[in-house]
Image (cartoon, rainbow, N blue to C red):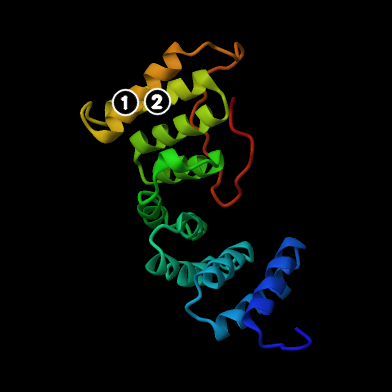
């Protein structure tokens, strides 16, 4: 930066380090400086959008993040944070449209399934809400709770549909599995505020 204060890679790298250190305002300023110099750079758009969301500016985050998938349709990180930004604004209908573009089976982070379940529930889509709660509890290794939600999701989808087959597969798998958590009980749908994701999901 001392040698070349306008170097895009240096600005971007500095912003990433500042973000890791929790220096959010400085980080966001340098992300913006990098973006001014490379307005179509996918990584800079992505991280500037994520920083805006972290800074409590979801509308700015949406403006940036919605440009990323146009550069790379496979950028699921951008889609996830775009959906979270809509959730932060209370626009759950837009959030579920974005979540619908994701492949549930490829999402490793169970918290994303939690967010998806809450968002679908807020739009009145009980079937997909239960389905994603099922995936959430499955990844949490709460077999009975996962089974409870998959069974609750089952009536909402035709048996021959793709989602219906997926649910049947999950139910069959969980029904055959040994119960490794004997104290586990089916969990009712938690309904915390999506603005402040907490860890107090009934188990």
Vertical arrangement, residue 135 with respect to residue 41, above or below: above
Give the residue pinned by disc 2: 150
**Percent position (x, y) of residue 80?**
48, 54
Element marked by disc 2: helix
x 41%, y 54%: residue:
95
Would residue 35 appear left or right of 162 to someone viewing this image?
Answer: right
Vertical arrangement, residue 119 with respect to residue 150, above or below: below
Would residue 3 appear left or right of 8 to someone viewing this image?
Answer: right
**Percent position (x, y) of residue 84?**
50, 55
Element marked by disc 1: helix
x 58%, y 67%: residue:
47
- Nearer to the camera, 176 or 64: 176
- Residue 73: which quarter of the image? bottom left
**Percent position (x, y) of residue 181?**
60, 15
x 37%, y 54%: residue:
93
* Crowd class of label 1 (few under 14; some 14 to 19; many from 20; radius 10 Å): many
Residue 12 in sight from this viewpoint: yes
User: Residue 154 bears which disc, if any?
Assistant: 1
The Cα atoms of the two marked residues, 1 and 2, are separated by 6 Å
Q: Are marks 1 and 2 in contact (CB under 8 Å)?
A: yes
């Amino acid at each position: 930066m001392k040698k070349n204060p306008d170097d895009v890679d240096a600005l971007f790298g500095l912003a990433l380090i500042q973000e890791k250190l929790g220096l959010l305002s400085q980080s966001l300023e340098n992300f913006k400086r990098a973006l001014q110099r490379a307005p179509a750079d996918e990584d800079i758009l992505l991280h500037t959008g994520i920083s805006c969301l972290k800074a409590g500016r979801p509308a700015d985050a949406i403006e940036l993040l919605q440009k990323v998938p146009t550069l790379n349709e496979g950028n699921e990180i951008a889609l996830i944070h775009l959906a979270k930004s809509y959730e932060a604004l209370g626009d759950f209908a837009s959030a579920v449209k974005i979540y619908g573009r994701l492949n549930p089976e490829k999402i490793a982070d169970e918290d994303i399934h939690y967010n998806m379940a809450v968002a679908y529930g807020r739009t009145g889509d009980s079937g997909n809400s239960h389905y994603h709660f099922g995936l959430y509890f499955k990844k949490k290794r709460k077999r009975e709770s996962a089974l409870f939600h998959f069974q609750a999701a089952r009536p909402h989808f035709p048996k021959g549909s793709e989602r219906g087959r997926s649910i049947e597969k999950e139910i069959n798998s969980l029904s055959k599995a040994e119960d490794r958590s004997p104290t586990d009980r089916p969990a009712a749908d938690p309904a915390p505020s999506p603005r402040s994701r907490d860890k107090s999901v009934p188990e």
